[in-house]
Image (cartoon, helix red, strand yellow):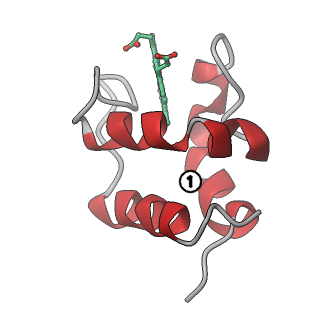
Amino acid sequence: MATSFQTDIAPMFAPFQANMMWRFNLADYDTVKTNALMIYGRLTGTTGNPMPAPPMPPLDPSLIALFQQWMTEGCPP
Ligand code: HEM
């Protein structure tokens, strides 16, 4: 099924938006699209410190896969 920022990505990031406002707005489509690769690296813990930051648990692998699919599909709004 096709992904979209509105239906898949924004709800996934909503609980963490306040914690990241100092740097960027995870609820903003253009911001997440522009920083998608960096965000993906943090979600998987392969680039930099893992996000969501400890002691919060990582996102469920199915949600990380969904974010990857959204990138593959060209970050649709
Ligand atoms: C899914 C949720 C989150 C995503 C996608 C995310 C994404 C990111 C990204 C991409 C950076 C790097 C920014 C840069 O290098 O310019 C970052 C840094 C940071 N984030 Fe998050 N974040 C999330 C949740 C959180 C939460 C819940 C907290 C705090 C409770 C947090 C605290 C921080 C802090 C303190 C940094 C700066 C230190 C560092 O670079 O590791 N983030 N985050």
Residue visible at 77% across and 63% down in the picture: 77
User: In this figure, which residue is indicated by the disc labeled 1?
Assistant: 12
The residue at label 1 has a CB less than 8 Å from ligand 1: yes
62 versus 54 height, above or below: below
Residue visible at 68% across and 53% down in the picture: 10
Q: In this view, does 20 lie to the left or right of 51?
A: right
Dividing the picture into quadrants, the one containing residue 66 is bottom left
Where residue 58 sits in the image (x, y, percent)? Answer: 30, 41
Choose between 7 and 55: the one closer to the eye: 7
- Visible in this render: residue 28? no
Dividing the picture into quadrants, the one containing residue 57 is top left
The amino acid pointed to by label 1 is: Met
- Visible in this render: residue 1? yes
Where residue 1 sits in the image (x, y, percent)? Answer: 55, 89
Dividing the picture into quadrants, the one containing residue 34 is top right
- The residue at the far top in this view is 22
Q: In this view, does 1 lie to the left or right of 66?
A: right
23 versus 75 height, above or below: above
Residue visible at 71% across and 35% down in the picture: 31
51 versus 27 height, above or below: above
65 versus 24 height, above or below: below
Q: Give the secondary structure at mark 1.
A: helix
